[in-house]
Image (cartoon, rainbow, N blue to C red):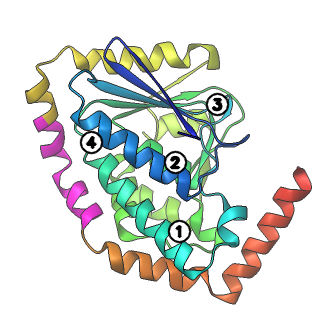
Amino acid sequence: MDYIHTKKDDHILHILLDRGRSNAMDVRVIEELIQVLQEAQVDPSIEAIVLSGKEGFFSSGLDLITLFAYNEEEMRHFWTRFMQLLSVFVAFEKPSVAAITGHSPAGGCVLALCCDYRVMAEGDYIMGLNEVPVGIVVPESIFTLYSFWLGQGAAYRSLLEGRLFKPQEALSIGLVDEVVPFDRIQISAIRRVKSVMQFEKNAWRKTKLNLRSELIRAMDRGQEEAVEQVLEQWWKPSTRDILKTIIHNLTQKR
């Protein structure tokens, strides 16, 4: 794989996102994540996963620079596979922890929300869903995922305002479960996942799926409609203008 590195240790599969400085996601990252999760689901030697980024970035979300150049067919394929990734991840029955090693806005935050626990590094980092200010429509299923952890009112307000949270703010609202120094993030993530690996596996996994049943249904229903809605907005001149400005700012920083 090009952008996903894995290592198995003590029945835990460590999944490292490794694409450029900020781990921005294009369709290849999505495809590799789907493959890794599907393989981990059926591998009896894997009992849990820890998903990590690199220092400074867990994932900056979607690679807007690359996606901006996609044609209509490529964009449709990307969004279809992205929604399928969320369905696979939300229904992943084994324990999962996100080791949020830095910034985690937008799509990076969505990945972390699919996990059972989130441990975030201390520092001047941000996390949250800021799609609306970027001009991207948020599907109902992602609101359901966000509100699963934050509650509907807090998720509603945060999404419509495009709010981003510093680590301690994220901890206070339940967006993350723990904030630790960067050099302790892997230790904390492993401790979190091992705390539930000790339980009877079938009982834990079936209970997880029971508790996530509505979330799993939300991810599976209306995917085509969600993709169409996102794509319609993506190609609007107003959204393209916003994206051009963001891309200009990103390239200037480089």
Q: What residue type is labelled 2?
A: Cys
Note whether 81 is above or below 181 in the view shown. Answer: below
Mark 3 vs 1, N-terminal side: 3
**Residues under numbered marks 2 and 4 in contact, where contact means CB atoms less than 8 Å apart:** no
For the point 31% across and 34% down, the residue is: 40
| Residue annotated with mark 1 | 160
- The residue nearer to you, when weighing 220 against 196, is 220
Q: What residue type is labelled 1?
A: Leu
Q: Which amino acid does label 4 sit on?
A: Phe
Along the horizontal axis of the image, is 240 left or right of 87?
right
- Alpha carbon distance from label 2 to label 3: 15 Å
Dot 1 surroundings within 10 Å: few (below 14), some, or many (20 or more)? some
The tag on residue 92 is 4
For the point 59% across and 57% down, the residue is: 26
Residue lying at the far front of the rendered structure = 1
- Alpha carbon distance from label 3 to label 1: 29 Å
Q: Does the magenta stretch include residue 77?
A: no
Q: Which amino acid does label 3 sit on?
A: Lys
Residue 114 seen in this snapshot:
no
The tag on residue 54 is 3
Magenta region: 206-220
Dot 2 surroundings within 10 Å: few (below 14), some, or many (20 or more)? many
Which label sits in the foreground, 1 or 4?
4
- Alpha carbon distance from label 3 to label 4: 23 Å
Mark 3 vs 4, N-terminal side: 3
Q: What element carries label 4?
A: loop
Q: Is mark 3 on a helix, strand or loop?
A: loop
Residue 186 seen in this snapshot:
yes
Mark 2 vs 4, N-terminal side: 4
Along the horizontal axis of the image, is 152 left or right of 203?
right
| Residue annotated with mark 2 | 109
